[in-house]
Image (cartoon, grey):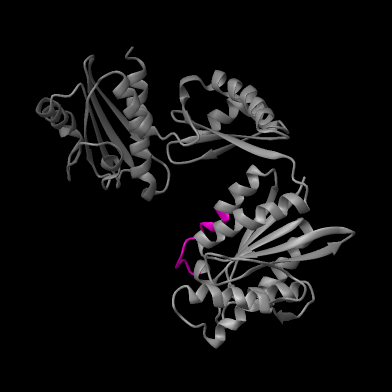
Amino acid sequence: MTSAEIITIGTEILLGEIVDTNTRYIARTLRSMGVDLYRTITIGDNVDRIASAISHSLERADFVITTGGLGPTIDDPTREAVAKAVGLQTEFREDLWEQVVETISRYGRTPSENQKRQAYVPQGAIGVRNPVGTAPCFIVEKQISGKTHAIISLPGVPNEMEHVLHESVIPYLQKTFCLDEIIKVRVIHCSGLGEGMIDEKIADLETLSNPTVGLAAHTGVVDVRITAKAKTEAEADALIAQVEAQVRERLGSVVFGVDEDRLETVVLDMLARRSMTLTAIESGLDGMLARKIPHTASIPDLSPGSLMETLRTARNEFKTDIALGVLANLEERSADMAMITPSGEKTHHITFGGPPKSLTRWSTNLALNWLRTTLEEVK
């Protein structure tokens, strides 16, 4: 199977000034094309380090995609770094310069002299038009052991990168590497059991080779990821369906959704289907529950002893079917919950052993899951 690595370039990423969204976007695109992604890496604006990273990536992968470092300034080093990685010089390309001039002229401006740097690429590179930006892209092919490998250099600006990726790079990859497989992923969301307990229930499935099964623990939520490789989407779907059925059978009501489902939307949908109304109060959650559930009141300095009484008052005031209250105590790393339903009142106290800053998210997710399991009992 064809393999790839991604290198994002930019000191500003390493300094935390901007967030790298390009890697995730490219990774998901390659996944859908059946490409195995070996690794991703971020390198600052240093020619030698970038060249070294590219050289090592080419030793492992069939092609490497770089993003960033194609601008007109001295600290845009990708062109020189790619050339150095493959032992070439850069050359000025009149056709690429014409692209730069054409793009800039659309803004009613004349290109400056330093923008000519963008028309320099490694000798013999395949020029790739960037119709939505001023930085031309390029592809450098290299024969290794009689097989074509490639370095594909794309802009760092996300909307430019995405456009060129779909318009030019994907067709190139499909033709050059004869991509005829796809990879599909199904993510099953679980809450109510920890990662270790879920692992015990599906451990044998995690040893499968196709589809593969893996776990990812979040705060109060555990994802079961099923990844299938196949020639067609239908074949991949069939492989995933077989394993998903086994996961659901073993985990039962712990499963609350798949893929883009979220606990709060699942809960709100359940309430709507049952024609039930909800009011909620929170304390010590920094508004996290309020951002997920409409009509949630944030009450500072609420004590565990007054939680239920405050919840009764809120339910009576808004005349709702269900009331949910959550109080997080950062010092004690614990949370108190209360719920009132047509069937009665109940409380729940939980303690947390993780990082203090995760307490609010953990408390919110566990409270939502508590509400979800309660609603499942309502027919």
Q: Which residues are magenta?
A: 15-24
Q: Residue 124, image x and y in percent?
A: 77, 73
Is 109 situated above or below 292?
Answer: below
On the question of residue 334 being in view, the answer is yes
Q: Is residue 115 above or below residue 222?
A: below
Q: Nearer the viewer, residue 341 or 326?
A: 341
The residue located at (56%, 60%) in the rendering is 161
**Image quadrant in which the N terminus is located:** top right
Quadrant for residue 94, please give it.
Answer: bottom right
Instruction: Report the side of 49 relative to 18 (left or right).
Output: right
x then y, percent, for residue 376: 37, 18
Instruction: Describe residue 183's horizontal placement relative to residue 191 as left or right.
Output: right
Magenta stretch secondary structure, dominant: loop
Q: Tell me which corner region of the image, top left, top right, bottom left or bottom right, holds residue 131.
A: bottom right
- Taking depth in this image into account, of 315 and 283 the one nearest to the observer is 315
Q: Residue at 63%, 43% (x, y): give it.
A: 32
Taking the view exactly as shown, the residue that stands out farthest to the bottom is 113
Residue 21, magenta (yes or no)? yes
From this view, report whether residue 8 is shown above or below residue 298: below
The C terminus - image quarter? top left
